Image: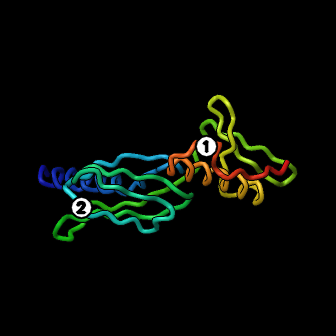
Amino acid sequence: MVRRALTAALLSAVALGAAAEARPVQVPADHATLIRLPDTASAVVVGNPSIADATLYDGQTLFVTGKLFGRTNLIALDTDGRVVYTNDLVVSRSDRGSVEVFRNVNRESYSCAPTCEAAPRVGDQTDWFTDRASQQADRIGAAQAGLPASQGSPRPQNN
């Protein structure tokens, strides 16, 4: 009787541990999250790198950055190629501080903290998205080149 109770308790603990590990890691788009690995890893692979990116900080600390909405998986391997960690990653939208403006069926996205700035997202009106994304790319390029933002190539705005 005691043996059965111990066996049942052990099986329940194993099942609960497996269920807890099976829960996907939730990462908001454009945010990073930290995963502590159970053992030392030497390599990390993300199934679809357009959805998320993973960086191994040290052998047991992993940073995952959400890029595009969707679901993919992550696998961490040790130096012998054994799986140390595997799980699904779900990248979702973060609505914290965001505002969407609709003009008929066309959407424009803004990030407000507290002042609102354009924050193009997948699904925004195509011309608006392209113009803002191009301006952001120009600004990033100017910053990487060491130029003041005002010297980047200006883009006309369509109002």
> Cα distance, mark 2 to mark 1?
45 Å
At a point 62% along the width and 53% down the height, the residue shown is 138
Is 114 situated left or right of 27 in this image?
right
The residue where tag 2 is placed is: 84
Give the label on residue 139, or none. none
Mark 1 is on which residue type?
Ala
Is 103 situated left or right of 2 in this image?
right
Give the label on residue 149, or none. 1
Q: Answer few, some or many: residues within 10 Å of disc 2's Cα (few below 14, many 20 plus, some between 14 and 19).
A: some
Residue 92, horizontal then vertical, whole percent: 55, 52
At a point 71% along the width and 55% down the height, the residue shown is 129
Determine which quarter of the picture holds residue 83. Answer: bottom left
Mark 2 against mark 1, which lies toward the viewer? Answer: 1
Residue furthest to the right in view is 104
Q: Nearer the viewer, residue 151 or 79?
A: 151
Residue 35, horizontal then vertical, whole percent: 33, 49
User: Above or below — where is 102 with respect to 42?
Assistant: above
Residue 80, horizontal then vertical, whole percent: 16, 70
Is 149 situated left or right of 105 in this image?
left
At a point 68% along the width and 39% down the height, the residue shown is 117
Mark 2 is on which residue type?
Val
